């Protein structure tokens, strides 16, 4: 009887693992909401939960916007807060609890300071500390922050893009103020020239920090001690065979079973103008890919696997990699891309092998602004863009995949105009709307007409536009396209109301 039960358990476990794999392969991104920002753009996004409120912080040039996020993925503005000298952008942002107090730490990139804000009960912010750059602390053009909790204290690690770059550690006091502990100057060995991504793993009570060097094209590992000091463990540089680290950018990690992994993306230097920004211009473009490193027992990085970009993936210009969900067998990752203007979903299995699930073309370039957040059993992504003309923050839900084969999407826009709108203004608005098809290739068709109903139920709506898209990617591109945003800005003052509906239908 015991043998039968044993084999039954093995079968159940195998079946559950199969189901988990199938579930992760059968998911997609569904946009849930978007809201305007008060800043000039959205460069960085982070999230936090306080008093049962799920908070989203969007940092850009000039300020930080605060929103709540509910279980339906709806964003509600709470407040906005000016950055030091009204500059920025707020590139690195991390929220954490330090001895019972919640703080948001912000790397003010061009303000050359680290700002500490206390998170109030409703999610709003109150600045409590400001640390300026010095010749010894490498806070100039600060980009990435990482909080590390040790036995007796917590520390903030800081990296950036200084002319004389390096890695710094500060002790976080109970009031949020920062006390300098150690700074390590970059050299030809370590990869800390342009730290845009960091992650920590704990191995048998020891803490290790992993950094990516954008300018020096590689990744490094460091041992962090209880007093906040640190030392270099090992370093791995880019090559043209089994890793893609030119312009090493996002860095994250995950533990699956007994294995610990570091996942590194890159925005290759070929995507930048060589006008002095790129220090080493003798690079060779050998494609795009996501590199996976295994962490050995000593905390060192070991090259393990590379998922190469191809015609089925959107991995060009990776700027952020978020862990969406994990179990003991696999992890789901989201990769935000600047050059492909997409969010690519990936699966990492226990053996450390990455495989693509699917992607959504967002219609805007993601520049570090991507954050994964969980509410109950649901996983969300919040995204933003450095585009100055966009001015939005967007939420997505990870949902079961929907089969759209053989269907097209109808986007119905019903409008009514204000009484003071002239006939000439209305005619111009119609013509501007129809011109979108010439400016946005993803629009398959536009037709329009003036209301001819005599039933008395039109509620004052007079004009209807029907746009056809061949897939959800096209709708996203249209929604956040500059031509569409310009239309809304131009026509908005004479619009008295809008009623919009979308539906999928067969092409027959």
Image: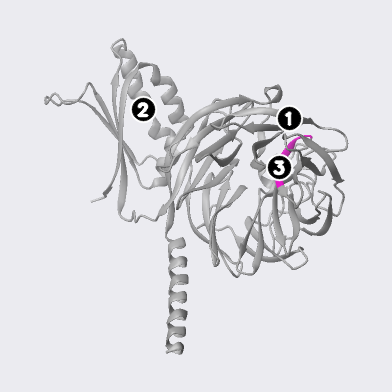
How many numbered discs?
3
| 3D distance between C-alphas at marks 1 and 2 | 49 Å
Report which quarter residue 125 is drawn in: top right
Residues under numbered marks 2 and 3 in contact, where contact means CB atoms less than 8 Å apart: no
* Residues packed near mark 2 inside 10 Å, few (<14), some (14 to 19) or many (20 plus): some
Residue at the location (59% across, 40% down)? Answer: 46
Position of residue 86 relative to residue 343, above or below, is above
Label 2: element kind: helix
Q: Which residues are magenta?
A: 140-147
Q: Which residue is mark 1?
A: 129
Characterize the local packing of mark 3: few (<14), some (14-19) or many (20 or more) Cα atoms within 10 angstroms. many
* Mark 1 or 3, nearer chain start: 1
Left or right: where does residue 68 sit relative to residue 412? Answer: right
Q: Is residue 145 magenta?
A: yes
- Res 27 visible: yes
Disc nearest the viewer among 1 and 3: 1
Foreground of the two, 49 or 113: 49
Query: From the viewer's perspective, is 41 left or right of 480?
Result: right
Q: Which SS class for mark 1?
A: strand
Residue 217 position, x and y percent, is 75, 52
> In this figure, which residue is indicated by the disc labeled 2?
433
Do the residues under discs 1 and 3 have CB atoms within 8 angstroms?
A: no
- Quadrant where the N terminus lies? bottom left
Q: In the image, 499: left or right of 143?
A: left
Residue name at image x 22 percent, y 21 percent: 460
Image coords of residue 37 (percent x, y): 53, 28
Please provide percent x and percent y for residue 380.
48, 47
What's the mark number on residue 144? 3
Nearer-N-terminus badge (1/2): 1
């Amino acid at each position: 009887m015991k043998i039968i039960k044993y084999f039954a358990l093995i079968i159940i476990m195998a079946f559950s693992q199969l189901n988990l794999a199938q579930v992760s392969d059968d998911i997609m991104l569904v946009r849930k909401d978007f809201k305007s920002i008060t800043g000039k753009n959205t460069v960085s996004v982070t999230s936090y939960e306080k008093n049962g409120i799920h908070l989203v912080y969007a940092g850009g040039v000039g300020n930080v916007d605060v929103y709540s996020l509910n279980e339906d993925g709806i964003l509600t503005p709470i407040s906005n807060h000016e950055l030091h000298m009204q500059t920025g952008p707020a590139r690195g942002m991390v929220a954490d609890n330090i001895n019972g107090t919640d703080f948001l730490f912000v790397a003010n990139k061009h303000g050359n300071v680290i700002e500490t804000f206390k998170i109030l009960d409703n999610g709003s912010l109150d600045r409590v500390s400001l640390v300026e750059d010095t010749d010894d602390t490498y806070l100039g053009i600060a980009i990435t922050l990482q909080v590390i909790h040790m036995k007796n204290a917590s520390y903030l690690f800081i990296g950036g893009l200084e002319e004389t770059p390096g890695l710094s550690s500060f002790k976080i006091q109970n009031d949020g103020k920062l006390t300098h502990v150690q700074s390590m100057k970059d050299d030809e060995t370590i990869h800390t020239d342009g730290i845009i991504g960091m992650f920590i793993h704990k191995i048998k009570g020891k803490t290790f920090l992993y950094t990516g060097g954008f300018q020096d094209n590689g990744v490094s590992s460091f041992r962090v001690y209880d007093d906040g000091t640190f030392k270099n463990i090992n370093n791995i540089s880019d090559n043209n065979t089994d890793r893609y680290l030119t312009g090493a950018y996002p860095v994250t990690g995950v533990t699956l079973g007994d294995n610990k992994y570091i996942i590194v993306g890159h925005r290759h230097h070929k995507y930048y103008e060589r006008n002095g920004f790129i220090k080493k211009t003798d690079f060779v473009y050998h494609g795009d890919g996501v590199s996976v490193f295994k962490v050995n027992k000593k905390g060192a990085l070991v090259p393990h696997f590379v998922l190469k970009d191809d015609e089925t993936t959107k991995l060009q210009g990776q700027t952020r990699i978020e862990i969406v969900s994990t179990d003991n067998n696999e992890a789901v990752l989201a990769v935000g891309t600047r050059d492909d203007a997409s969010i690519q979903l990936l699966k990492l299995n226990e053996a450390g092998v990455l495989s693509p699930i699917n992607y959504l073309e967002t219609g805007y370039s993601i520049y570090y602004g991507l954050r994964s957040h969980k509410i109950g059993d649901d996983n969300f992504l919040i995204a933003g863009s450095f585009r100055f003309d966009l001015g939005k923050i967007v939420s997505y839900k990870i949902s079961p995949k929907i089969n759209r084969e053989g269907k097209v999407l109808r986007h119905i826009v019903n409008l009514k105009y204000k009484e003071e709108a002239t006939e000439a203004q209305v005619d111009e608005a119609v013509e501007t709307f129809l011109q979108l098809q010439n400016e946005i290739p993803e629009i398959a068709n536009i037709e329009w007409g003036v209301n001819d109903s005599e039933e008395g139920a039109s509620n004052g709506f007079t004009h209807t536009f029907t746009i056809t898209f061949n897939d959800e990617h096209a709708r996203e591109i249209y929604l956040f396209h500059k031509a569409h945003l310009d239309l809304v800005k131009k026509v908005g003052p004479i619009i008295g109301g809008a009623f919009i509906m979308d539906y999928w239908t067969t092409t027959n």
